[in-house]
Image: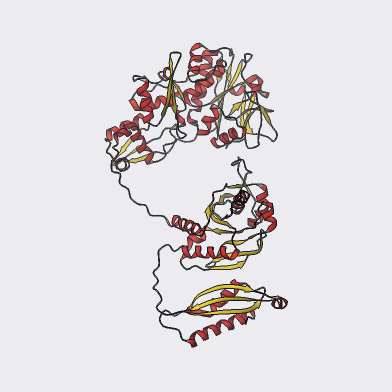
Amino acid sequence: MIVSWNWLKQYVPLEMSAQELAQRLTMAGLNHEGTTEVEGDLAIELEVTSNRPDCLGHLGIAREVAALWDLKLQVPTAQVNESGPRVQTLTSVQVECPKLCPLYTARVVRGVRVGPSPAWLRRRLRTVGISSVNNVVDVTNYVMLECGQPLHAFDLARLDQRRIVVRQARPGETLLAINHRTYTLEPWMCVIADASRPVGIGGVMGGAETEVSEQTTELLIEAAWFDPVTIRNTARRLNLHSPSSYRFERGVDPHWVDWASRRCCELIVEVAGGEVAQGVIAVGTVPPPPQPILLRWSQIPRILGIEVPRETVLSILSRLGLKPQEQGDRVQVQVPSWRRDLQREADLVEEVARLYGYDKIPEDAPVPLAPVPQQPREEVICRVQQVLTAAGFHEALTPSVVDQNQWQWWHPWTSLDPLCTQTPVLGRAQLLRQTLLPSLLSCYATNEKLGNESIELFELARVYLPQPGSLPQEPLVLALVSQREYATVLGILQALVKRITGKGRLEIRPSGQVVFSQHSAQLWLEGELLGYLGQVAPEAAKALEVRQVPVVAELRMEVLLDQAQLVPQYRPVPETPAVRYDINYVVPVEVTWAQLEQVVLRAAGELIERVQYRETYQNQSLARDGKKKILFSLWFRDPQRTLTHEQTHRLKAQIDQAAQEAFGAQLG
């Protein structure tokens, strides 16, 4: 932001030197980049951070100067002498996309004489690096640089049916902008149109076909408030950045839209003549002012480490336009509309420190700190990250949208209709993901193409599940993709569940998911569906351009959160020995280890300590009979006494009988 010294003096008396001004503004957060002399004026360049769009105009800088030096601020009244017919008889405005343009105002000035700007206006613009075009365009630039609100002037006679329609672009529409380049518009972009065609890219740049020329006699003055995200995405997609888009991206003050419109008309009449039609067309609403914020007196020394006199604090808040009201041990302030960065108590403490002077805070000022314990949710997430990192996984961060190809394969996973964003994200399609796996597999494929040998990835993020008639659900999900074997990944998940729940045991059930190949399982935890585990089907892997078919899993974090046992539980070291049996059952080929494990656990009773799967074996003879062998180990232990041979033999016999009754199992 380049500020003119002479221009700044119009709003606040500058009794200090330019060097002192630059130094004080730097200490207050507006870093001084340099000062240049321009035709008897000073061009002061300041770095304005993205959270201070109010300082993207001379009035905003003047407010800072007035607050720092306790000076009186003089804001132009922007009074317009309106005459002639009402503006509604001369033009009309229709807003079809209120989310992209919450507020649009239009005024009409008739009988203007377009020509060169007066010397004072040209000089002001040259000082801040803006070339003069004509008196009308120069006024719109002047007002933007004065208050930070961009404006645009249309040649009203060139608008088809003399009307404005604010809408989204239609497929295939193009616009010849005032920089004489043609841009292809996309349907999510906000355009300013007349009755038949686009005449401007909302908040970015106007069109050449309706720009002001020497033949123009009627003006439509646009002052609006556009959605910052849409403006930013539009400017980036078209590679078309302007002073207007720069300000709209950071957020203009909607409460000053009408002031800027009146100020623009006032100056146009002054430099180009004409008359302003009566009234204004305003479509949309101005949001209510921000809620008051309470500042506790005790928080100032706690955060800053020093005491600041109350009268000084009240003076600082008043100079900032916050209208402080003391309420015992605290003070309530009303945040002005242009300071949208002030949202909480700590922001007010920062304002006090900024104007009081950071140099008055000693480097060794004691600031008391208190550790904040992690919430259960944070602890569970931390344990998930610890376990998976220890197992050799790397955490990934992927976009929340997927393209049509990814959606095609993973839509059956949820069987829900897609949710679409209004604007593209990172240049991708607009489909919000309902599972993390396509995004994670895309990351896996990228690493594979780059020749990375070990690709073990996990991600913790939200998915978006539509609900008819209400906002979508956004559950937290854990997904992982691995080059390891199915059984290894299952073991890692079992270790993860044990780390979080203490004693939770995963139950494996067939899932039948179409995006998986022969390895497909539902994971259940204490009667609740936790998630899915499986190996990606080869055809799905081919469509996603994955060469080595990985094993993937996705877990619902709310199940882990509900069953988390985060307090360490004491368990005494067993003093009695365990008795181990290695068992080899011949069972039908359709019997799964998960089914057999459940039968074994139920039959063994309380003395079973552990069951561990070993392997599954099948030869030609077993295959002909539709059989296979499952080898596993189990351990018995009584914490009170040593088990006898008769006791363990009886327990094993119970297990053999239960397996035989359930599956016709025979000892191999």
Please say whether residue 224 is visible from this viewpoint. no
The image quadrant of residue 410 is bottom right
The image quadrant of residue 229 is top right
377 left or right of 304? Answer: right
Residue 245 image offset from top left, x and y in percent: 55, 30
The image quadrant of residue 488 is bottom right
Q: 142 above or below 445?
A: above
Q: 183 above or below 479?
A: above
Report the front residue among 321 and 277. Answer: 321
128 left or right of 571? Answer: right
Q: How is the image coloured?
A: secondary structure
Number of marks in the image?
0
320 left or right of 282? Answer: left
Report the front residue among 310 and 4. Answer: 4
Residue 169 image offset from top left, x and y in percent: 65, 34
Residue 360 image offset from top left, x and y in percent: 29, 34
Residue at the right extreme of this rendering: 624
Please say whether residue 187 is visible from this viewpoint. yes
Residue 601 image offset from top left, x and y in percent: 53, 76
| Residue name at image x 48 percent, y 61 percent | 562
| Residue name at image x 49 percent, y 67 percent | 504
- Quarter in which the C terminus is drawn: bottom right
| Residue name at image x 59 percent, y 54 percent | 453
